[in-house]
Amino acid sequence: MSRLRRVLLAAFLGALTVAGLIFVTLAMPYLFRRPPTALAAGLPMPSDRIRLAVLGDSDSQSYHDTRMLGDPNMRGGPRRATTWQWTEVLARLRGNQIDLGDWGTWGTGKYRAYFDEAFGALARAPRKDDYRYNFAVSGATCNQLMGHPLRETPRLVDLMDTEPQAWRGGIVLIRIGINDLGAQDILDELSRDPNASRPGAAINACIGAIAESVALIRRKHPDTNIVLVGVLSNADWSIKFDNWQSAGQIANIDAGLDRFDNGLRKLAAADRHVHFLDDRAWFRSLWGTRDDQGRPLYKTVHLSPGWAITNASGDDPHNAVLADGHAGVVWNTLWTQHLVTSLNTAFGLHLKPVTDAEVFGFLQPSFTASTRADAPLLTPLTK
């Protein structure tokens, strides 16, 4: 062997050694890190709990993640301690039946995640405090279900592959699309034409990405159930009430968003393991809609004792929406109640329904912490 070839071979082997040392240094603590135990919540945790994973955006990322969501004004601001996102509500009310994974710090930066994937290790990004099976990330768009930098679906499936038996009868909930379809310019175009080309392309791309996600999960885990959540309308957001004040414009927006929901319905109709959950219908059942002229005419949700929740924005729990535009604690708690009932109906489960009494008990600390003192005594919620 020539001297030059020996030098080149030594350099190559040295590079491999350095790469290996870097991998061991970076990856091993991540691969073998032990998460907090589920018993830390103080609830008995039976081994037959149903695993539930989440793919999506800020509508599903836990509010008490202060690692990624470190701004103190976010997710309830001064009332953040008693402002909960729906997965956090579900873990507290049905954590002995549903397993969202241990709470801990999960994920890395995107480049580290690429490195982990290249070496066959489990990967996820970004780094956040959340439940282990909650892959939802604030700001996520539909293309990031399958594509970089998040690759939510393939990375979740890789994790599921490590314990395939545990995911038999489990659930993956996909709730995404508002960042693609809720922007002002998209809704403006839909308000003029529900079949406008640019919103139509975004709708089709979202449906395609969700369909790919469903196909991957069903192929690798055929006994896992999937929930597809429809998109909300930002025309119902209080800061947008001055926009689209005509019945025709609102009808056009709804028709455009129906195209997205109908795409999800079609996916669900083709597979008994897939269920569609109509989010706008649920919202309308509580807070209603605009009037025949497209002007705000929303109802007030009455909870007992003395709690009136209006479709307004602010960190006080009497508002449906937080100051940063995300669902408030009442919204998320009632949505959790609805979700548990829907899961039982869709998949024949036997989860204990969330009662109105549990809703009131869970929300009591949020209203006790509220400084608002002008709410009148109201009648109990009826269903």
Image (tube, rainbow, N blue to C red):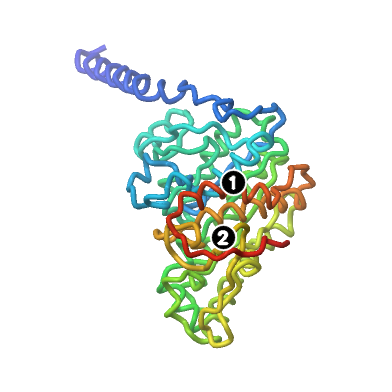
Q: Quadrant of the C terminus?
A: bottom right
- Position above or below: 153 against 184: above
> Within 10 Å of the Cα at label 1, are there few (<14), some (14-19), or many (20+) other Cα atoms?
some
The disc at residue 13 is none
Kindly tell me whether residue 258 is visible in this rendering: yes
Asked where in the image residue 81 lies, by quadrant, the reply is top left
Asked where in the image residue 231 lies, by quadrant, the reply is bottom right
Name the residue beneath numbered marker 2: 307
Could you tell whether 308 is left or right of 187 in the image?
right
Name the residue beneath numbered marker 1: 362
Q: Name the spot of residue 353 as percent of width and height, x first.
A: 73, 47
Q: Name the spot of residue 200 as percent of width and height, x first.
A: 52, 72
x 72%, y 39%: residue:
169
Closer-to-camera residue (374/107) = 374
Q: What residue type is labelled 2?
A: Trp
Mark 2 or mark 1: which comes first in sequence? 2
**Secondary structure beneath disc 1?**
helix
- Position above or below: 340 against 326: above
Closer-to-camera residue (374/214) = 374
**Secondary structure beneath disc 2?**
strand
> Within 10 Å of the Cα at label 2, are there few (<14), some (14-19), or many (20+) other Cα atoms?
many
Q: Which amino acid does label 1 sit on?
A: Phe
Mark 2 or 1: in front is 2
Q: Name the spot of residue 179 as percent of width and height, x first.
A: 45, 61
Closer-to-camera residue (108/14) = 108
Q: Is disc 2 in contact with disc 1, using a CB cutoff of under 8 Å?
A: no
Kindly tell me whether residue 146 is visible in this rendering: no
Closer-to-camera residue (244/44) = 44
Q: How far apart are marks 2 and 1 (CA)?
A: 13 Å
Q: In which quarter of the image is the N terminus?
A: top left
- Position above or below: 13 against 53: above
